[in-house]
Amino acid sequence: MASKTSYYTKEGLEKLKNELSHLKTKGRADIARQIAEARDKGDLSENAEYDAAKDAQGHLEAKIAQLEELMGNARLIDESKLDASTVSILSKVTIKNKKNGASVTYILVSEEEADLKTGKISTQSPIGKGLLGKKKGDVAKIKTPAGELEFEVTNIGL
């Protein structure tokens, strides 16, 4: 199965590298210690702690493999080449709901960096997809679980 390329900000890529490094060092050391402690308790065939520690080791290694694959397909976004005239990844876009007049500002980021609490939405989300390529003053009709909504792009920045 071909993996997709993911685009990251410098901050997002650094966070990914730090998580991978933490899991490879501290995470593996903690699991090894748990397995050793469980092994010291005797018969492994009936040792639930040993089984749980081996399961945790499997989950940890799967997470490490997943992060390594993400890192292998990660690309750093060159912010100097971004255009503020149209909505694209890393755009800081203010939109106004045409129905109720409410305005909200989002930063469009990769799926892995999305965090609604900090105003970062994925370019793969319905709103993110609907805003990509729009210019200031354009109206985006976006299908959401709540129905079709219309948003006017009132500002685009970087």
Image (cartoon, rainbow, N blue to C red):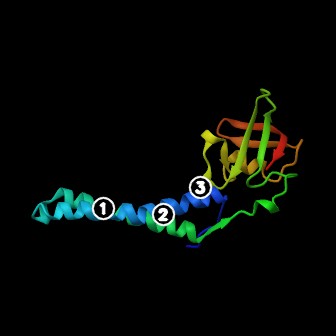
- The answer to whether one can see residue 5 in this image is no
Within-10-Å neighbours for mark 1: few <14, some 14–19, many 20+: some
User: In the figure, is residue 67 to the left or right of 56?
Assistant: right
Residue 112 circle label: 3
Residue 72 falls in which quadrant of the image? bottom right
Q: Quadrant of residue 34?
A: bottom left
From this viewpoint, is residue 32 visible?
A: yes
Q: Which residue is mark 1?
A: 31
Mark 2–mark 3 Cα distance, whole angstroms, equals: 14 Å
x and y, in percent, of residue 95 in the image? 79, 38
Left or right of residue 56, residue 3 in this image? right
Alpha carbons under labels 2 and 1: distance apart = 15 Å
Q: Position of residue 11 (x, y in %)?
A: 63, 56
Q: Report the residue at 66% width, 67% height from top.
A: 75
| Location of mark 2 (residue) | 20
Horizontal relation, residue 130 to residue 116: left or right: right
Comparing 53 with 17, the one in front is 17
Residue 70: horizontal and vertical position, in percent?
56, 66
Give the residue type that dot 2 points to: Leu
Residue at the image point whose x is 26% and y is 62% from the top: 33
Relative to residue 3, is residue 126 depicted above or below? above
**Badge 1 amino acid:** Ile
**Camera-side residue: 143 or 86?**
86
Front residue of this view, candidates 17 and 92: 17
The secondary structure type at the circle numbered 2 is helix
Please tell me which of labels 3 and 1 falls first in the chain.
1
Q: Nearer the viewer, mark 2 or mark 3?
A: 2
Determine the residue located farthest toward the top in the rendered image: 100
Q: Amino acid at mark 3?
A: Glu
Q: Position of residue 76 (x, y in %)?
A: 68, 65
Q: Residue reaching furthest left?
A: 42
